[in-house]
Image (cartoon, rainbow, N blue to C red):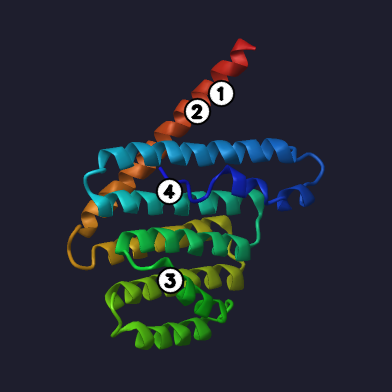
Amino acid sequence: MKRIIGRAKFETGGEARNNESAGEKSFEQKQEEVIKQLEMVDTVAEKLKEKYSQYETLSLFVDHLASTEKIFIIARQTNAGFDKTKTKFLESQMELMAEESGIDKKIYEKILNDFANASDNVLAISVIAENLKRQYRNREGGEDCLQFIDYIKEALLAFANITSNDLGWDEIEAEKLRIIEDKMKLLSADGNPEIETLRSIYEEFKKELEEQKKTNDNQTEKNAQDK
């Protein structure tokens, strides 16, 4: 499985070290915990991708779930700035959606660069999205480009909501679910796959994550007892 957000990228993010206070776990311990969570997501994703390997759209949806989950794990555990988190998210989605559509990645990169001018300004995000849709509507692959533009627009609006309203982690979790819901709507826009199929896979993904967490916790407890 292609790991879009992995160990190497995480290790470059040293913000948590500077934010430690007395009594907190060491940076190294925190880092190792996050790495374990990222690997847990990979384990679950690989299992589901194998299960749905004959269905490209469903397999790519699992990729999306995994990359989104990893991004919010990193943000939640390291207090990383949302600019970095947002960049990782958008780049990962560009990779997945370019692979899914067959559109040249450079086209999606240009669209992202245009969106970068909006910063976190909600009005600017919407205006740029409409301008891009007019620009790409009649081009070859235009329908896929329009879907990508709409998806990035909604993701940026979600991130802008987080940064401008100083949301707590429960509210950030709600934004993550909203992003996933938006992806499900896009993938099921033509009725194939049905959105209920995607929701079922997401429920399966969450259940598998919980089961994997229990397995990991049990193994950690056993290792501690064996020492």
Residue for point 50% across, 37% down: 39
Please name the amino acid that badge 3 sits on: Tyr
Q: CA distance from mark 1 to mark 2?
A: 6 Å
- Report helix, strand or loop for mark 4: helix
Q: Nearer the viewer, mark 4 or mark 3?
A: 3
Instruction: Give the class, few, some or many, for how many residues have Cα within 10 Å of label 1's Cα (few <14, many ≥20).
Output: few
Query: Which of 69 and 93 lies nearest the eye of the viewer?
Result: 93
Tell whether 56 sits left or right of 135.
left
Q: Nearer the viewer, mark 2 or mark 3?
A: 3
Looking at the image, is mark 1 or mark 4 earlier in the sequence? 4
Q: CA distance from mark 2 to mark 3?
A: 38 Å
Residue 172's x, y, as percent?
52, 60
Please identify the residue farthest to the left as the structure is shown.
191
Q: Residue 108: which numbered mark, if any?
A: 3
Q: CA distance from mark 4 to mark 3?
A: 21 Å
Quadrant housing the N terminus:
top left
Q: CA distance from mark 1 to mark 3?
A: 43 Å
Please name the amino acid that badge 2 sits on: Asn
Q: CA distance from mark 1 to mark 4?
A: 23 Å
Circle 1 residue: 220
Please name the amino acid that badge 4 sits on: Ala
* Total marks in image: 4
Circle 4 residue: 66
- Report helix, strand or loop for mark 2: helix
Note whether 122 is above or below 182 in the view shown: below
